[in-house]
Amino acid sequence: MSVITLALVTYIFVMAVTPGPNNVLLAASGVNYGLRRTLPMALGIALGGGFHCFVSMLMFGHLFELVSMIRLPIAVVGCLYLLWLAWQILRAAAPESGEQGRPLTFMQMVVFQWVNPKAWVMMLNMAALFMPQQGPLFSSALLIGLTDSLTSLPTVFLWAWLGDRLRLALHNPRHLQLFNALMAISLALTAAWLLLDEIRLLLSAG
């Protein structure tokens, strides 16, 4: 039976299109730098996320006992990085800074997938729900990874485009600064919520 099912595609789409660290960064970049300069970020998320998914499916296919050991360290590192990104967004294009700034690069977003707490939660759930109990591990992981990239592509472009459209309404520096502050607060709250959720799971398991 093929591992590519409607349930898998639906799960990936819902997780990819709903607000999270990736989408907050895309919207903020679209507002501050425009759609064209944000496209490398979007591709980095979709392709990097697919590669992350492929490797995670391979790893968790054999190492589910390791999950409890690596979840909290990954969550801590990822949430600290999210807080740093929130600070960068808060400072982006501030009227008094006088700096042009630049969006995150393709490779930065590829690497970010490995410390994105929401991405790890998604990978763990996908491995548990959609990896077959029997059959070729490599091909199953590869198919799920490709499905992840293809399904998330339209969602990342959507968030980048929404940010670019919103840019038209934020020519006023005060409005732009307010938007950046809201995005930064959203990202910081996401980091705190994800970290607290991981701590709650760890305490309940203990």
Image (cartoon, helix red, strand yellow):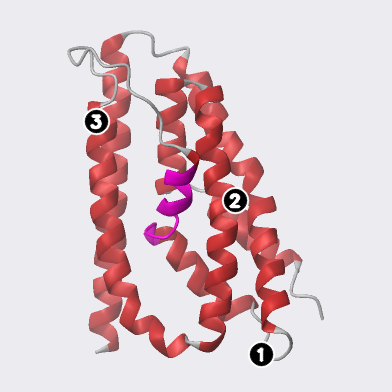
- 134 or 187, which is in the foreground? 134
Question: In this rendering, is residue 50 above or below 35?
Answer: below
**Residue 63, disc:** none
Q: Give the total of numbered labels.
A: 3
Give the mark nearer the N terminus: 1 vs 2. 2
The disc placed on residue 47 is 2
Front position among marks 1 and 2: 2
Q: Which residue is mark 3?
A: 90
- For marks 1 and 3, the one nearer the N-term is 3
Asked whether 201 or 107 is in front, the reply is 107
Considering the numbered disc 2 on the image, is that residue within a helix, a strand or a loop?
A: helix
Q: Nearer the viewer, mark 3 or mark 2?
A: 2
Q: CA distance from mark 1 to mark 2?
A: 26 Å
The alpha-carbon separation of the residues under discs 3 and 2 comes to 27 Å
* Rendered residue at 45%/55% (across/down): 113
Crowd band around label 3 with a 10 angstrom C-alpha radius: few (<14), some (14–19), many (20+):
many
Q: Which residue is mark 1?
A: 133
Residue 139: x %, y % from top left? 73, 75
